[in-house]
Amino acid sequence: MSLLGEAALVAGKDLRIEARSRVTLTQVLPFGGVVLLMFAFALDPDRGLLPRVAPGLFWVAVLLASLLAVARAFAVEQQHGASDGLRLSGLDGAAVFLGKAGAVAIELVALELVLGVGVVLLYDLEVASVGVLVPAALTATVGLAAAGTLYGVLTAGLRVRETLVPLLLLPVATPVMLGATRAFEAGLGGTPSDAWPWVGLLGLFAVIYTTMGILAFGPLLEEA
């Protein structure tokens, strides 16, 4: 089986588990919605401020939800010795990384679609360029999923993984938050052409962490 075939096998496993458990639907998605609602109520007296800060608030909600998604992706491997079965399966470590990161990315894309519609309606935004928002969201999502999966396996065998993953991931995700927020600002109400340097930054971050994950995930999984 090819590398991509093995990755698709791992991603399909994780997505089937999530579809059956409905954790993303019943916990992660409502969590993101509550975050956006809290900001809306907190800033409601100044309606002129909401459209300006909406891109940043959207990506804060996505980042916090991604922490839950990453934690969930590795929590299921700790149950009933599933992580041992994954190590003994003979699957390439790079394929396992791509599969798990791909599953997290798909969950985040679904979350972003729902939250994006909610932000536009709730914050009364006008979309200037969908052609900017889509590549910005996709590259940012890949970067978050790759970094989260890499740090998730790094802390998988630790008892404090629930608190250690945010401590490791949040500083690393700063370029994603910055680039995605600036790109969304340009795509929503600014000059769309100003977004492309930030999209390039997001793409560079995604490539770096995807490459690191492909190279390092296998040894880290063996040590987890």
Image: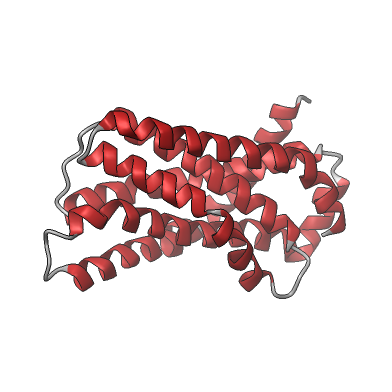
Q: Is residue 126 left or right of residue 149?
A: left
The answer to which of 17 and 101 lies nearer the viewer is: 101
Residue at 27% in and 31% down: 192
The answer to which of 146 and 198 lies nearer the viewer is: 198
The correct choice, above or below, for 149 with respect to 159 in the image is above
Residue 182 image point, x, y percent? 35, 44
Residue 150 image point, x, y percent? 69, 51
Residue at 34% in and 66% down: 35
The correct choice, above or below, for 105 with respect to 23 in the image is above
Q: Is residue 47 left or right of residue 72?
A: left
Residue 125 image point, x, y percent? 17, 47
Residue at 73% in and 65% down: 79
The answer to which of 63 and 207 lies nearer the viewer is: 207
Quadrant assignment, res 82 = bottom right
Q: Is residue 171 left or right of residue 179?
A: right
Quarter the C terminus occupies: bottom right
Residue 189 image point, x, y percent? 20, 41
Quarter the N terminus occupies: top right
